[in-house]
Amino acid sequence: NPSNYTMEQGTVLGRINCRSKGGASGFKVAILGAAGGIGQPLAMLMKMNPLVSVLHLYDVVNAPGVTADISHMDTGAVVRGFLGPRQLENALTGMDLVIIPAGVPRKPGMTRDDLFNINAGIVKTLCEGIVECCPGAIVNLISNPVNSTAPIAAEVFKKAGTFDPKKLMGVTMLDVVRANTFVAEVLGLDPREVNVPVVGGHAGVTILPLLSQVKPQCSFTPEEIGYLTARIQNGGTEAKAGSGSATLSMAYAAVKFADACLRGLRGDAGIVECAFVASQVTELPFFASKVRLGRTGVEEIYPLGSLNEYERAGLEKAKKELAASIQKGVSFIRK
Ligand code: NAD
Ligand code: LMR
């Protein structure tokens, strides 16, 4: 009976010690949607992260199998699986970081906004769980359309009186990861040496790479700018040659971002990444830009810096679409 399922790893003949109870130093992380295309490789990579002491894997299907599989990896984190809504409370209680890739992905021909009707309700329910069980946790929201689901999460938290804008991040790291890769290809550099700020949001024209601010400093021809901007904005469609949705590169990007959040929580200095957060950088209530992550989450949001004419035009387009997507998310909860 799935609703009775609960999985504690290594307890059959295990001697009770601090580690088997998840008491070792490190952070407690839950993945909601852990059995999915993103969830599984994300769970594997988080199990390999030395900052994680406890890893909770929650899904409405297949959580037991994924948990058993991942738990055999001989790394430090204790893994526990949770299946179905009755186990959401146990999955979330005590978590420092909750990563949410739950929900349906795009099929060919769909926009991210086409996912709204299904994923908005999923995100709402999961965030209501967070309100009850771990209202102080950092939340990394991956489920699309991020431009609407992050505002939905904020509204759920506001309604409950638990909203802390420093703790909620829509994950746009995949746009940065793609931008670094594509720019490095054009420049003939190692992608690890390249850093491209990508601001705005996470859909089509709202994805705004700031190619004038690439590190190391460089310049592009107008053709290169047009090519790179279009490729970064359409990376999601390219990722599975148009037949599905990015899972492996997304899991990599999610772990890169989650690791930055955990290093910030630990107190490391100078952790700066792009994320879609409650913001005053523009007139919109949410916007993706560079943020500094620290012990309390988003501790500083950086201004956009100087933009060239091409980027200023892109910003106006991005803001128009973003405003509607944010409002759609807000109205879903306030209706
Ligand atoms: P998937 O269908 O392979 O996996 C989704 C998982 O969510 C499934 O295992 C499903 O059982 C689970 N799920 C559904 N309802 C749930 C609920 N109520 N509670 C818990 N789990 C639930 O999809 P995927 O390819 O992993 O993509 C997941 C989401 O991430 C999609 O919305 C996709 O568009 C989005 N995505 C975002 C980015 C980004 O950059 N932010 C990148 C890629 C994909
Ligand atoms: C992506 O950028 O790969 C994701 O948002 C998935 C998608 O639908 O494109």
Image (spheres, rainbow, N blue to C red):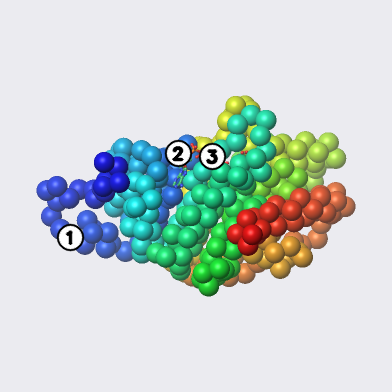
Q: Is mark 2 within 8 Å of ligand 1?
A: yes
Residue 154 shown left or right of residue 137 in the figure: right
Residue carrying label 3: 104
Residue 189, percent across and down?
65, 40
Q: SS at mark 2?
A: loop
Which circle's residue, 2 or 1, is located before the other in the chain? 1
Q: SS at mark 1?
A: loop
The residue nearer to you, when weighing 232 against 148, is: 148
Residue 221 shown left or right of residue 111 in the figure: right
Other-residue count near label 2 (Cα within 10 Å), few / some / many at <14 / 14–19 / ≥20: many
Residue 181 visible, this orientation: no
Marks 3 and 1, how far apart in space?
39 Å
Type of amino acid under label 1:
Asn
The residue nearer to you, when weighing 268 against 317, is: 317
Q: In this picture, is 251 found above or below 171? A: above
Q: Are marks 3 and 1 in contact (CB under 8 Å)?
A: no
Q: Are marks 3 and 2 in contact (CB under 8 Å)?
A: no
Checking the image for residue 35, the label placed there is none
Checking the image for residue 17, the label placed there is 1
Residue 67, percent across and down?
32, 43
In the image as oriented, which residue stretches furthest toward the front?
A: 335
Which circle's residue, 3 or 1, is located before the other in the chain? 1
In the image as oriented, which residue stretches furthest toward the bottom?
A: 161
Residue carrying label 2: 36
Q: Residue at x 40, y 56 (%)?
A: 29
Q: Are marks 2 and 1 in contact (CB under 8 Å)?
A: no
Q: SS at mark 3?
A: loop
Type of amino acid under label 3:
Val
Q: Is mark 3 within 8 Å of ligand 1?
A: yes
For residue 329, which quarter of the picture?
A: bottom right
